[in-house]
Amino acid sequence: MRPLIKYIIIAFFALLNGMLIAQSTITLAQAIDIAKNNNAKLRTETKLVQYRQALVNTAYRFDPTQFNVELGQFNSAFFDTGFGISQSFFLPKVYRKRAEANMYQVKSGEAYVRLSEAEIRQQLDELFSEYSFLTKKEGLLKYQDSLYNAFAQKSLLRWEKGESDILEKTTAEQQKLNISNQLSMLGKMKDYIIIHLNWLLNDGGNYIPETGKTDILPYNIFYDTSSVKNHPSILVSEQELLFAKSLTKVEKSALLPEFMAGYRNVSIRGTGADNQVYQGGDRFSSFQLGIGLPLFTKGIRSAISSAKIMEDIRTHEYTAKKEEIVAKIQQQYVLYNETIQQVNLYEQTALPNAKTIRSVSDKQFSNGQINYLEYVMLTNQAINIESEYLELKRNLNVYIINLHYLTNNY
């Protein structure tokens, strides 16, 4: 009985493992929610923001408070004691500038998180759109495959009976092989999309995109100057610029004086300056105030100059990023407008032609007016038109996805 129990246990765990890794269909909205919570890049960048937030108050870090003790003959020939405490500090303005720089760094990290969210949303849109296209394309290829399978079988019979030459048989086999190769490659592309999707979601599940209908995506796109300025990549450049400006102010604050305040308490034994005799228990106090001036400022001014250079670099980057986004929007609009015209032309002319070719060829083949080879060729022509239409819709969806991302409009 022991080997049987062993096999039962192995079979149970194999079944359980298969259930755990079973694929489940997921919608785009569900994928977006899962990615926001589990994507590895977003998790890392969110942690980095938390790290930078924890550093904000380090701007108010003071130098260590100095405690000192004095023992010996420093007031008279007798043994005296003394202790002191002192603290150095800058003007409040210095600490505020440091805190502002740290806060801009936090905002920069938050802008990177929003940029990553937008990029992941764009990738998910592309994956779902591409998977839906490939599924529809697969249906057309399978239909073509069934036609060429039947054609290849009939060609083989005709060749064996001597009713056709080797060219017809070879052509049929090659067409069948081409379709088979396309289906195999298409299957690998779908697998790639599934792997990429699950990598983006990163929650341990095994998902496949919901396909639905392969239609044109909603075109809810509007943009103006303000919407372009709110694009995540431009916001990142803007925060980097503000951070660079804040660092310049921090470097300039190094030219401000540093202050010191202290307290000192000592004993005196013997006759004091007032001709009175003091014992060891008598104590005298004093206060100290000091100021530190940066007399040698060459290094400080070099740091300020380098900070200003970085500020100029960030300014140019910010301007260039805005120009880049506007140019990309205009490019995508050109491609979108051209493609939508072709889609409309196909819907008005090419698709009705393909439908006519299919229906007429079906009737002619049924009536014996054309042979099977002619029927296959005509049907293949109609399928190619439908495939070209699918390609156009696929390209159009890519442009719409890009415009949604570039205009930050979903």
Image (spheres, rainbow, N blue to C red):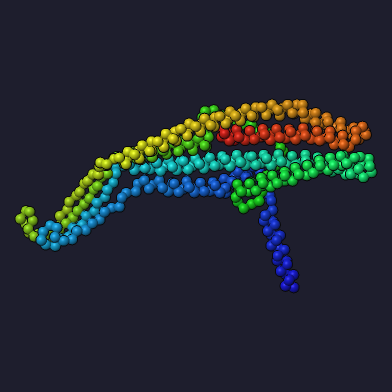
Question: Nearest the camera: 111 or 190?
Answer: 190
Instruction: Locate residue 96: give its quadrant.
Output: top left
Q: Is residue 389 left or right of residue 296?
A: right
Tell me the quadrant of the picture where the C terminus can be found.
top right
Taking the spot 52% from the left edge, 43% from the top edge, the residue there is 113
Q: Is residue 174 left or right of residue 63?
A: right
**Furthest residue in direction front, as rendered:** 166
The mark total stands at 0
Give the percent coordinates (x, y) of residue 306. 38, 38
Give the percent coordinates (x, y) of residue 364. 90, 32
Question: Nearest the camera: 115 or 409?
Answer: 115
Can residue 229 be spotted in the picture?
no
Against 350, residue 297 (above or below) is below
**Furthest residue in direction bottom, as rendered:** 1
Taking the spot 55% from the left edge, 42% from the top edge, the residue there is 117
Can residue 21 be spotted in the picture?
yes
Question: Nearest the camera: 155 or 5?
Answer: 155
Question: Nearest the camera: 278 or 141?
Answer: 141
Instruction: Locate residue 409: give its quadrant.
Output: top right
Taking the spot 25% from the left edge, 41% from the top edge, the residue there is 295
Against 25, residue 327 (above or below) is above
Q: Is residue 162 left or right of residue 326?
A: right
Give the percent coordinates (x, y) of residue 217. 66, 34
Taking the spot 61% from the left edge, 30% from the top edge, the residue there is 332
Give the percent coordinates (x, y) of residue 386. 76, 34
Tell me the quadrant of the picture where the N terminus can be found.
bottom right
